[in-house]
Image (tube, helix red, strand yellow):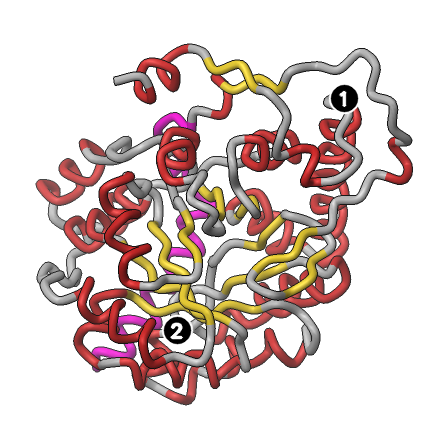
Amino acid sequence: MQKSEYTSSRKREHLEICCEKNIEAGFSGFDDVKLVHNALPECDMESIDTSVRFLGHNLSSPLFIAAMTGGHPDTLEVNRRLACAAEHFNIGMGVGSQRAALENPSLEDSFTIVREEAPKAFLCGNLGAIQLSEKGPEWADKAVEMIDAQAICIHLNPLQEAIQPEGDHDSKGCLDAIRELCKTSKYSVIVKETGCGISLETAKKLWGCGVSAIDTGGLGGTSWAAVEAVRAEEISLAEIGRKFSDWGIPTAVSLIEIAGQNKPVIATGGLRSGTDIAKGVALGASLGGMALPLLKPAMESYESLAAAIEKIQRELVVSMYLTGSQDLDSLSKVRTYITGITREMINI
């Protein structure tokens, strides 16, 4: 089997495992965050404005369809439904890693369908930092061109690569590659983790490279170590995957560490409701990304996906109303109570 075929078949396996197995692990920290209730909201819930401007684009909601899939023919329909939702609700969307389609152009359809179904949506391409380091900015350009994206997400996934049977274990040169891309690209560069979070120290390095935004991709949602543990044929590798399934920085902790720099931050990792998105905005996020909560309904039908998004949106609006927030700017100033492990971690 050629390398591109390995990559493509792996994408299908990932999709099946995420939908069929219990691969959520860790603690996101959002249960430790409470929005201060306002008994006198002094606003009209029906006219609450959830719109946000992100990287120069006007979106109707901070809900962001986080990177999920693509790169195998069986993933095309899921991406089509997600793209239709992004267009209908005017929300941002990121595609899954485009490595498979870059290695084998015959797989591009599972990605190009996204722009076809969402001609006006804010779309983000996706490429691994290791592939960027190996192939150079040209691959990032091709990924963006493939879906006519306005931005690219460069994903960091050292834990997944460490557990993955066919993983890339040499990450030297990734920071320099990101810096070079930021210097040469005509599109926005977002750097995201994939389930282990980004620390303040790493964020400072990334801001120094000139990245446009950071996506926390923190602990508390889908564990790619757990996913790879399911895939691993070697018992020892599977055991290591399970051992590291809760490795990382909780999303809320990562967000608190890296927000407040007047730089856009996406809170992703374990957000499971519109209230979690509201908490993320109150803690400094511009957007709140969700993957697994949208993937499962997207696998069923577009109607199920649209219903899930409408529920999340309603939860966000109710949360804003109960904090007296007429818009997201007001929500970003709402006071929070932080307790438990999250409080202990941010006070270390």
In the image, 305 versus 97, the foreground residue is: 97
First reached walking from the N terminus: tag 2 or tag 1: 2
The magenta-colored residue range is: 1-28
Quarter of the figure that contains the C terminus: top left
Q: Position of residue 242 (x, y in %)?
A: 22, 34
Instruction: Using residue 174 as the reference point, say whether residue 324 is left or right of it.
Output: right
**Residue matched to label 2:** 98
In the image, 15 versus 145, the foreground residue is: 145
Residue 150 figure quarter: bottom right
The image shows residue 126, relative to residue 322, as above or below, that is: below
Q: Position of residue 119 (x, y in %)?
A: 69, 78
Q: Which mark is residue 322?
A: 1
Q: Nearer the viewer, mark 2 or mark 1?
A: 1
The image shows residue 59, relative to residue 340, as above or below, that is: below
* Residue name at image x 38 percent, y 79 percent: 185
Residue 34 figure quarter: top right
